[in-house]
Amino acid sequence: MKLGKNQNQNFSWTPYLFILPAVIFLGLTSFLPIFQAIYLSFTDYDFIGNPSFIGWQNYDKLWRDRVFWQTLGNTLTYLIFAVPSLVIFSLALAILVNQKIRTIKFFRAIYYFPVVVSVVVAGIAWKWVYAQNGILNYFLSIVSSQNITIPWLTDPRTAIFAVISVVIWRGVGYYMVIYLAGLQSIPQDLYEAAAIDGSDGWQKHFDITIPLMRPYIILVSVISSISAMKIFEEVYIMSQGGPANATKTIVYHLYDKGFTSLEMGYASAIGVFLFSVIFIISIATFKFASPVAIR
């Protein structure tokens, strides 16, 4: 009983007062909009009049929306192709720039440079590169000695992969830094012991680096998966969702319905669906990956 009494006497509200401003800010900017979006998803709202309750009609419309399912397929394409590339290329690049050479800081800065470039600037620049008379087709024409004019952003078969390439180019440096922090925490003694056992070159990375970097690989997989589900800026700047909705994502479809067609209730239903998918993916990833990371 004395222990419980002492615990009550030692209780302090000071830590809670320190986090109170952050909780209030997070509530106003994150939790409140979530509940508002859930409410609006059951209404007919166009920014002009008051929201009118219509029940599950927006979700029924979502189920029958052909464009929505096309954008869902496009989003999954981004997820399938972009995430593994970011996980693998970023790790390989981090291993390369983790070498102890004189100019390594310069190379780290070069590889990280796309991260600090504005997405607007990067999108416009790559749009010029992908133009039919752009640098990429010009370079291919020189290499092949033929006049090549590939419609990178105007052909549904190539447009989505052109955008994915830009997403990878912008993200690989960011995830490289995360991996680099993990690599520098690995003791060099392990590599020296592995070299004595005959594990050298790239083989030491399969024996030591990858197993010890597993928590970082899981972290990068989760972050890049969430980012892939929310791709918008690159698509908006480079292709505006075209051609024929070939590059249109769920977030772009949400933006189009909410701020172009003024169907805010339907856009909220799309947002709730996207939030649910990301929430499920995050919970499942942490649930099944955490024991693996601990081991």
Image (cartoon, rainbow, N blue to C red):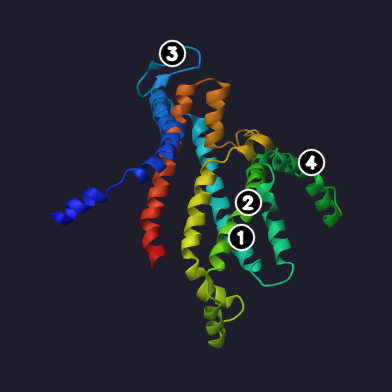
Near mark 3 (Cα within 10 A), the count class, few <14, some 14-19 or many ≥20, is: few
Which amino acid lies under the numbered mark 3 shown in the image of this protein?
Asn
Could you tell me residue 217's position as x and y percent? 50, 60
For the residues marked 2 and 4, what is the alpha-carbon distance in whole angstroms? 22 Å
For the residues marked 2 and 3, what is the alpha-carbon distance in whole angstroms? 42 Å
Report the residue marked by disc 4.
Answer: 132
Q: Residue furthest top?
A: 49
Q: Is residue 7 left or right of residue 28?
A: left
Near mark 4 (Cα within 10 A), the count class, few <14, some 14-19 or many ≥20, is: some
Residue at x-position 41% and y-position 53%: 285
Q: Residue furthest left?
A: 1
Near mark 2 (Cα within 10 A), the count class, few <14, some 14-19 or many ≥20, is: many
Compare marks 2 and 3 and give the one earlier in the sequence.
3
For the residues marked 1 and 3, what is the alpha-carbon distance in whole angstroms? 50 Å
Which amino acid lies under the numbered mark 2 shown in the image of this protein?
Ile
Near mark 1 (Cα within 10 A), the count class, few <14, some 14-19 or many ≥20, is: some
Residue at x-position 17% and y-position 51%: 5
Compare marks 2 and 4 and give the one earlier in the sequence.
4
- Per the rendering, the mark at residue 50 is 3
**Contact between labelled residues 3 and 1, with CB atoms less than 8 Å apart:** no
- Per the rendering, the mark at residue 168 is 2
Could you tell me residue 195's position as x and y percent? 57, 84
Could you tell me residue 232's position as x and y percent? 59, 37
For the residues marked 2 and 1, what is the alpha-carbon distance in whole angstroms? 9 Å
Mark whose residue sits in front, 2 or 3 = 3
Compare marks 4 and 1 and give the one earlier in the sequence.
1
Compare marks 1 and 3 and give the one earlier in the sequence.
3
**Quadrant location, the N terminus:** bottom left
Q: Is residue 293 above or below residue 249?
A: below
Q: Quick one: SS at disc 2?
A: helix
For the residues marked 4 and 1, what is the alpha-carbon distance in whole angstroms? 28 Å
Which amino acid lies under the numbered mark 1 shown in the image of this protein?
Phe
